[in-house]
Image: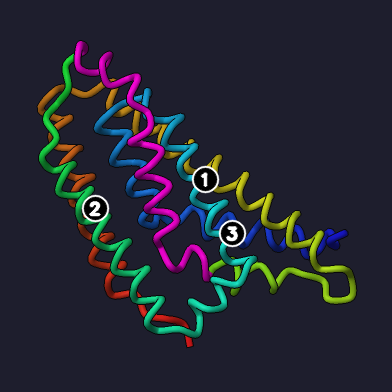
């Protein structure tokens, strides 16, 4: 079992990391502002699945490979960057939805899940994070596997709650906005995603 001191330190460090918006949170906020409260649950599910995928890939060794292979890191980086830019352009072109359109879109949850999952998974830092971050909080005098499971599960819960809170706040802004302000927020979200795509493209592999 993990020591309480290590666990508390992990909680505090994770909270600081999660509060700072990255590509995933920018996507969640932008999509929630564009599509409203119906997008909150699928976006949150997508973030959970993306972080779970990244954690699983890191545990089976891909994180270590990404940390040492410049070519593989670049592939993940460029795929993630391209997808973020694609979503940014798409959001820039999003028109304010009417109530009828919103009702029709309410059943289309898979695109939100897919987008959040892909953006989270394709960020090479997401995978390398679990390799570089979690071991610092593992007590080497105790069996590591259970500690990794506890820390990983804790981070998944925290990341999911964090994404949900951001999405709920953004959806509330959408709920009180006018068509003109909806277009403005959609373009702000699109611009943020474009910026995140460019920033992702410039990421450098940790040495």
Q: Position of residue 160 (x, y in %)?
A: 54, 42
The image quarter containing residue 178 is top left
- Horizontal side of residue 49 vs 97, given as left or right: right
Which residue sits at x=49%, y=37%?
Answer: 45
Q: Quadrant of the N terminus?
A: bottom right
Q: CA distance from mark 2 to mark 3?
A: 26 Å
- The colour mode here is rainbow
Taking the view exactly as shown, the residue that stands out farthest to the top is: 100
Instruction: Give yes or no for residue 70 being in the magenta stretch.
Output: no
Which residue sits at x=47%, y=45%?
Answer: 47
Tell me the number on the disc at residue 55. 3
Taking the view exactly as shown, the residue that stands out farthest to the bottom is: 207
Tag nearer the camera, 2 or 3: 3
Q: Secondary structure at mark 3?
A: helix
Q: Position of residue 55 (x, y in %)?
A: 59, 59
> Which range is magenta?
99-128
Whether the residues at callouts 2 and 3 have beta carbons within 8 Å, the answer is no
* Crowdedness near tag 3: few (<14), some (14–19) or many (≥20) residues, C-alpha within 10 Å: many
Q: CA distance from mark 2 to mark 1?
A: 22 Å
Which residue bears the numbered disc 2?
A: 192
């Amino acid at each position: 079992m993990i020591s309480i001191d290590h666990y508390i330190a992990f909680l505090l460090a994770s909270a600081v990391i999660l509060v700072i918006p990255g590509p995933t949170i920018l996507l969640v906020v932008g999509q929630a502002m564009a599509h409203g409260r119906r997008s909150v649950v699928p976006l949150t599910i997508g973030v959970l699945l993306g972080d779970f995928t990244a954690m699983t890939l890191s545990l089976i060794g891909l994180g270590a490979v990404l940390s040492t292979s410049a070519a593989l890191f670049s592939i993940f980086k460029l795929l993630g960057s391209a997808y973020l830019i694609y979503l940014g352009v798409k959001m820039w072109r999003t028109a304010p939805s009417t109530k009828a359109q919103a009702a029709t879109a309410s059943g289309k949850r898979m695109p939100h899940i897919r987008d959040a999952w892909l953006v989270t998974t394709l960020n090479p830092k997401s995978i390398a994070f679990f390799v570089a971050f979690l071991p610092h909080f593992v007590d080497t005098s105790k069996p590591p596997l259970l500690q990794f499971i506890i820390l990983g599960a804790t981070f998944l819960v925290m990341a999911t709650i964090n994404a949900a809170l951001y999405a709920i706040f953004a959806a509330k802004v959408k709920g009180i906005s006018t068509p003109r302000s909806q277009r403005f927020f959609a373009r702000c979200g699109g611009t943020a995603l474009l910026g995140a795509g460019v920033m992702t493209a410039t990421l450098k592999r940790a040495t």
